[in-house]
Amino acid sequence: MPKYKRVLLKLSGEVLAGEKHIGIDFGTVKDFAMKLSEIRSAGIELSLVIGGGNMIRGRDSEDYGLDRVSLDSIGMLGTVMNALAVKTALESLNVPAKVLSAVGMSPIAEPYSRERARDYLKAGNIVLFGAGTGHPFFSTDTAAALRASELGLDCVIKGTKVDGIYDKDPNKYPDAKFFPELTYSEAISRNLDVMDTAAFALCRENKIPVWVMNVQNSDSWVKSIIDGDNVGTIVKEV
């Protein structure tokens, strides 16, 4: 049985780039859409926030001496492009999907509202939230925590390249310590590079667990979500 019935899946944009590492690989997107369809078919109400790191990262602006606000705006557009790519792939599988954007860009995407999102989710749509929070300086992690809080969802699932949260990068340090469970305060105080502090704090305030798991090196993550397996790391109150 699923551990959580109403979830928001937060992914980096790089997940959609495949071996290209930049841009959108539509073969990878189609494979990913099939996994989302499987989760939905299990009766899980599913929404997504996908980052724009396969396009551009506003926080990299300092490396080039460019304006952070302008680059964050470009990044917001990148997230909408990613959401539209996934929506198109889902619809090719006859899975209903909607893109709701925090920044007005009709008719490409509908404007976000809590009521609209709730209605679409209840109707069985997979809902993709684009354009982050609609403001610069806020990460898509924070956007995921915000949408989950607004909609009263059961869990934010953070997809990563590793099996959960470690005290340091396990790909660089063989002695890295794995945490099967953490409190929000522990995750924040340890300054772990998984989600930003604002996202963890928002989830803590609204008592929304954050489930961190590997979604890139294996297909088992889909089964884990459906079966409620104790994999990865859960960040929650004691």
Image (tube, rainbow, N blue to C red):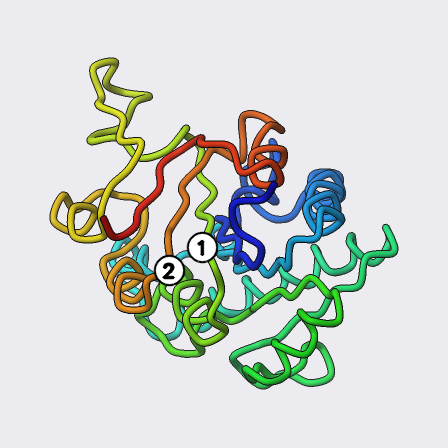
Q: Residues within 10 Å of mark 1 (few under 14, many from 20)?
A: many
From the top left corner, tell me how far across and down residue 189 is, in percent: 12, 49
**Residue 214 image offset from top left, x and y in percent:** 47, 33
| Number of the label disc, if any, that sits on residue 52 | none
Mark 1, secondary structure of its residue: strand
Query: Residue 145, located in which quarter of the rendered image?
Result: bottom left
Q: Looking at the image, how many numbered discs can be counted on the residues?
A: 2
The residue sitting at 63% across, 61% down in the picture is 83
Q: Is 185 left, or right, of 123 in this rendering?
A: left
Residue density around tag 2, few if under 14, some if 14–19, many if 20 or more, within 10 Å = many
Where is 192 relative to 52, above or below? Answer: above
Q: Quadrant of residue 179 in the image?
A: top left
Q: Identify whether 98 is placed above or below 188.
A: below
Task: Note whether residue 184 is visible.
Answer: yes
Q: Residue 208's mark?
A: 2
- The kind of residue on which mark 1 rests is Val
Q: Position of residue 205 (x, y in %)?
A: 26, 68
133 w.r.t. 84: above or below: below
Q: In this image, 114 relative to 170: left or right?
A: right
Evaluate if marks 1 and 2 touch, with contact meaning CB atoms under 8 Å apart: yes
Residue pictured at 33% horizontal, 21% vertical: 171
Tell me if residue 67 can be seen.
no
Q: Residue at x 32, y 62 (%)?
A: 207
